Amino acid sequence: MRVLVTGGAGYIGSTAVDILTTQGYEVSVFDDCSTGHGDNVPTGITFIQGSLLNRSEIAQALKGCDAVMHFAGKSLVGESVEKPELYWSVNVGGTRNLLDEMRVARISKLIFSSSAATYGEPEVLPILESASNKPTNAYGATKLAVDAMITDEARGHGLSAASLRYFNVAGALKSTRGWLTERHNPETHLIPNVLRSTPANPVKIFGSDWPTKDGTCIRDYVHVVDLIDAHIKALNSLSKPGHEIFNLGSGGGYSVREVIAAASDAIGSQIPFIDSPRRAGDPAVLIADISKAKRVLGWEPTRNLEAMVSDTLASFG
Ligand code: UDP
């Protein structure tokens, strides 16, 4: 089976490319390298550098493929609030183009990178896939819109698809070519920021007055290797027209202070931090209910916070 990995030059997509290849899948990569890095794509892999906004480039990339893992898209919450048009254009318009070209090419299997940002501020914890969707930013709104588009595509045109709603992805994979690390600029994610904290430039804790046990936000972290394992299981579960949505997290949560403590243990000294104001748009607690992915896909995350911290640290070299 040949899988087109859109966004295959990015952090999560390149991890998928590596694991798919190791497991014997043929892989093509489609990426515009706006945030991804071409050097993440191994030599010997079919790599089409192109845009989701260009249908002929998508058509070219789909040649010979049997399925698509769609990671490409804009993914920064803050940027999505400042430039919503970019998010609607690339995430929604771009995915519309992809679905249209998949239909032309008669490719009917799709795994989509959705997000827990579709849920917004949760009413009930842990969050089930059936929870209400009230995204609090354009990023979450566009992921939700794409999920709706995929549902309709499955109903109308027989697409067989799964949307995977990521909670907080962390960690890294050591490939044969070295670590596939997070290289975002600017970096907004907690674990990389904690590991790069210095006394002169300490990591900011965004809010220490949240209604949680230690006053800091709680998030559900999942290792990128476990995440990709779920993608492959989801791909193999696609057998008939339809669209299923699965949460991917660990099913448990850690506070910002607990993450800093785990990272301090990993490096053997206290990581400097500074208590700072809350960040706009942050919910206090996000924890996934992952029972559907466990039950339907037979998936179980196996890597804990310590592994996520130590692999991220190792990937920074
Ligand atoms: N956070 C923080 N300092 C940082 C980055 C993040 O305190 O430099 C907090 C953030 O407010 C949230 C958690 O860490 O509660 C995880 O944030 P991240 O941006 O990694 O992921 P998000 O949950 O926003 O997807």
Image (cartoon, rainbow, N blue to C red):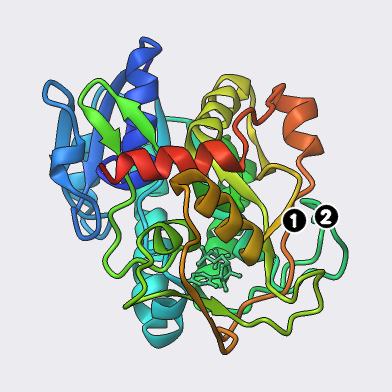
Left/right placement of residue 218 relative to residue 73 reads right
Residue 126 badge: 2
Q: Secondary structure at mark 1?
A: loop
Closer to the camera in the image, 233 or 88: 233
Q: Are discs 1 and 2 less than 8 Å apart at CB?
A: yes
Can you say whether 274 is above or below 226 in the image? below
| Ligand 1, image quadrant it occupies | bottom right
Closer to the camera in the image, 41 or 223: 223
The quarter of the image holding the N terminus is top left
Can you say whether 302 is above or below 139 in the image? above
User: Is residue 62 at all visible to an observer of this figure?
Assistant: no
Judge: label 1 CB < 8 Å from ligand 1: no
Give the residue at the far top of this rendering.
24
Judge: label 2 CB < 8 Å from ligand 1: no
The quarter of the image holding the C terminus is top left
Left/right placement of residue 237 relative to residue 90 reads right
Can you say whether 189 is above or below 162 in the image? below
Q: For the residue marked with disc 1, what is the amino acid? A: Ile
Q: For the residue marked with disc 2, what is the amino acid? A: Pro
Residue 46 image offset from top left, x and y in percent: 16, 27
Left/right placement of residue 38 relative to residue 270 reads left
- The local crowd at label 2, few if under 14, some if 14 to 19, many if 20 or more residues have their Cα within 10 Å, is some
Residue indicated by mark 1 = 287
Residue 117 image offset from top left, x and y in percent: 61, 65
| Label 1 vs 2, first from the N-terminus | 2
**Quadrant hosting residue 120:** bottom right
Mark 1 → mark 2, Cα distance in angstroms: 5 Å
Closer to the camera in the image, 200 or 292: 200
Instruction: Please state the total of marks drawn on the protein image.
Output: 2
Closer to the camera in the image, 262 or 239: 262
Task: Identify the residue at horizontal 52%, vertical 49% (top origin).
Answer: 169
